[in-house]
Amino acid sequence: MIILAIETSCDETSIAVMANGKILSNIIFSQIDIHQKYGGVVPEVAARAHLEKIAIVFKEALETAKIKSSEIHYVAYTATPGLIGALHIGKVAAQAISVYLQKPLIACNHIQGHIYAAAINDIFHFPLLALVVSGGHTQLILMTKHLDFQILGQTLDDAVGEAYDKVARILGLPYPGGPIIDKLAKNCQKIYALPSIKDDGTLNFSFSGLKSAVINLFHKIDKDIDSNFTSNLAGSFQKVAISTLILKLKKAISIYKPKMIILVGGVAANSQLRKEVMYLNNDDCKVVIPPLEYCTDNAAMIARLAMQIIKDTIKK
Ligand code: KG4
Ligand code: ZN
């Protein structure tokens, strides 16, 4: 079974080919360079850039996978959530390919795709707890079987990736802020006091208070005294952001006693977060964190989700 998958929900134009569960190609064209001059993703610019690149990415995905378009059995695409104009480009491309090849079209959810990134190289064991951390979402999701997603908690304001990006912007760092804050935090020599997380008894998250506290601190710091202030602030912010995620994750573990924990989404690329979530691995509960190319937006995860949808709902 060969699945062609298209992901265009934000600022990556990505097309993957999966054959019988194996990823043959996962081409990702990142628009980061285009959006960097605006300090963030501009939806209209993203849609135009997807339009410009999608045919080239399609060609490259087929060439890398060494398949002909006539060999494709299913066409999957990210339907929601995401930037509407960006999503439309992927949808129209998927529809055109599916109509031309007369093959079924599978609409996929982007967040569910991030979750299934962890199933590309591993087998899910249930109950499974997923910590989804991306630029748009921060959610704790419980799965008791395939394609069953129960949201246990989510952010009440900013997503954690969004907080990374906004803090980076204040510190004068380029978009996206996550990777650069991750790097700078390694050089943190002084931890600034920031409001610690209050255990409110729920599994929800909140990052806007932390973001505002970092912004206020940035304006107050005497930059002549602390010449390492960018790294110090990056490290101080990251420490609280990660401890918030870990606190809620541990709380969910104690309640739902999962057999597997997965960390997915763009922020799952964070080196410190990967380390701290990996510590939770034990004989009763396996921790799976996808390789970096499957953490940030990519079409391989959409192909893997589509495979599950085909198996469990179409071919039943
Ligand atoms: O999943 P993703 O590629 O796109 C969305 O669905 O939003 O996530 C993008 C987010 C951005 O906010 C980016 O700053 C963050 O993931 N990110 C990171 C790292 N790499 C990407 N955050 C922290 N540390 C990283 N190494
Ligand atoms: Zn994403």
Image (spheres, rainbow, N blue to C red):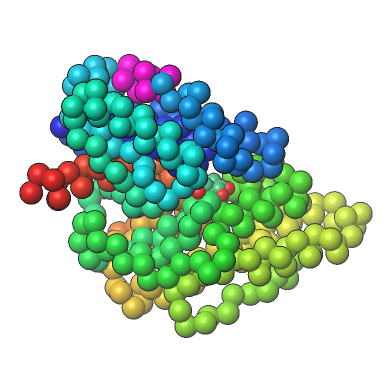
- For residue 306, side relative to residue 173 (left or right): left
* Horizontal and vertical percent position of residue 194: 70, 70
Q: Quadrant of residue 180?
A: top right
What is the span of residues highlighted in magenta in the rendered image?
56-63
Task: From the image, give the main secondary structure of the stretch colored magenta.
Answer: helix
Q: Work out whether 310 lies above or below 30.
A: below
Q: Work out whether 46 lies above or below 279.
A: above
- For residue 68, side relative to residue 168 (left or right): left
Looking at the image, the residue that sits furthest to the left is: 316
Q: Quadrant of residue 222?
A: bottom right
Nearest the camera: 181 or 100?
100
Q: Residue at x 15, y 50 (%)?
A: 313
Q: Work out whether 54 lies above or below 233.
A: above
How many circles with numbers are drawn on the protein? 0
* Image quarter (top left, top right, bottom left or bottom right) of the N terminus: top left
Q: Residue at x 56, y 69 (%)?
A: 206
- The answer, for residue 238, to whether it is visible in the render is yes
* Horizontal and vertical percent position of residue 310: 17, 44
Q: Quadrant of residue 7?
A: top left
Q: Residue at x 74, y 56 (%)?
A: 232
Q: Examine the structure image and report whether residue 60 is included in the region drawn in magenta.
A: yes
Q: Residue at x 59, y 54 (%)?
A: 162
- For residue 45, side relative to residue 217 (left or right): left
* Horizontal and vertical percent position of residue 283: 27, 64
